[in-house]
Amino acid sequence: MKLGVFTVLFSEKSFEEMLDHVKAAGLEAVEIGTGCYPGNAHCNLDELLASPEKRRAYKRAVEDRGLMISALSCHGNPLTPDKSFAQQSHDTFVKTVQLAEMLEVPVVNCFSGTAGDHEGAKYPSWPVAPWPNEYRDVLHWQWTEKLIPYWREWAAYATDHSVKVALELHGGFLVHTPGTLLKLREQVGEGIGANFDPSHMWWQGIDPVAAIKILSKEKAIYHFHAKDTYIDQEKVNMYGLTDMNSYANLHERAWYFRTVGYGHSQQTWADMMSALRMNGYDYVVSIEHEDALMSIDEGFERAVQNLQQVILREPVQNLWWV
């Protein structure tokens, strides 16, 4: 495995300053945002798509530092009733896939998207209760009329461009659990897999190690985000796990994101790294820092320190004791 970082936290730095900072921290990979929610501070899609010379310089800047690009990330919502943002999300995805092929980056990370509750809806709707029955009707419509048709076409497009689509299993989007990912995959094929982030498993009550095993049976983990979650049981008792308090209001949140090691123990993270290797994932572990209690640098450095202790880097050549 290699240790990397989702570089959006360094958006104030120039591209080369960011690469130098990542290299100095002892990392081996960068995951780069190309637009929509992550922004595009380190990747101008149109500029790079238009210029072979700029693409060569971009790739050389990464490789000359001994780094690699693990994924290009364009998290948006191509299914939203907001036509402007849906189009932006779609166009950014298509361009990101094109650039990934040109740069020989094997993975594009994004969200599945969430549709409205009918064709004339104004806002996205995320049904998570099976009753009253209207919620199931909405969910069925979203899947059959929006989600499956979209990804059947555009997962195939990515495959045609030698790119795997890694959908982040994230609340608020139709694909948010191992089960929803595998359900969509059955319909659209292996062009899609998971960008697996344990922080979004914990708050849904899912054991990440068990989820890794479930997804790995189908070889469906294409990328991995390293982010932690702290569960405040006292607040869970008040608000439940579908807490709608703002992420900025930590005192009232039932759960909130932490940097690696500050929500769960080193042993828990070691168990995840072991499960990844045992089940065939030997790609990049990409740090995502969204800890509201730590500065950019402190949260990043603590995550690096903690993951360096548990990541499994070296391949096993043989079982020398057997």
Image (cartoon, helix red, strand yellow):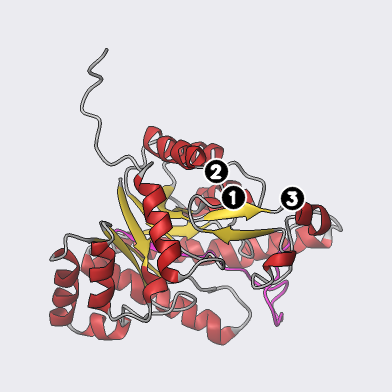
The answer to whether residue 170 is seen in the rendering is no
Q: Residue at x 32, y 78 (%)?
A: 42
Q: Residue at x 67, y 46 (%)?
A: 205
Task: Say which element carries label 2.
Answer: helix
Q: Sequence order check: which comes first, mark 1 or mark 3?
A: 1
Q: Residue at x 45, y 54 (%)?
A: 226
Q: Is residue 47 positioned above or below 221 on the image?
A: below
Examine the residues drawn in magenta and state their main secondary structure.
loop
Q: Is residue 279 positioned above or below 38 on the image?
A: above
Near-viewer residue (283 or 236)? 236
**For the N terminus, which image quadrant?**
top left
Picture disc at residue 208: 2
Q: Is residue 218 positioned above or below 85 on the image?
A: above
Image-quadrant location for residue 162: bottom left
On whether residue 108 falls in the magenta region, the answer is yes
Q: Are marks 3 and 2 in contact (CB under 8 Å)?
A: no
Query: The residue under label 3 is which amino acid type?
Result: Gln
> Range of the magenta residues?
105-127
Number of numbered discs: 3
Mark 1 lies on residue:
201
Q: Are marks 2 and 1 in contact (CB under 8 Å)?
A: yes
Q: From this viewpoint, which residue is outermost toward the right?
A: 132
Q: Sequence order check: which comes first, mark 3 or mark 2?
A: 2
On whether residue 26 falls in the magenta region, the answer is no
Classify 10 Å Cα crowding around label 3: few (below 14), some (14-19), many (20 and above).
some
Task: Say which element carries label 1.
Answer: helix
Mark 3 lies on residue:
233
Query: The residue under label 2 is which amino acid type?
Result: Pro
The answer to whether residue 6 is seen in the rendering is yes
In the image, taking residue 5 as reference, residue 134 lies left or right, namely right
| Residue 224 in picture, x, y percent from top left | 42, 52
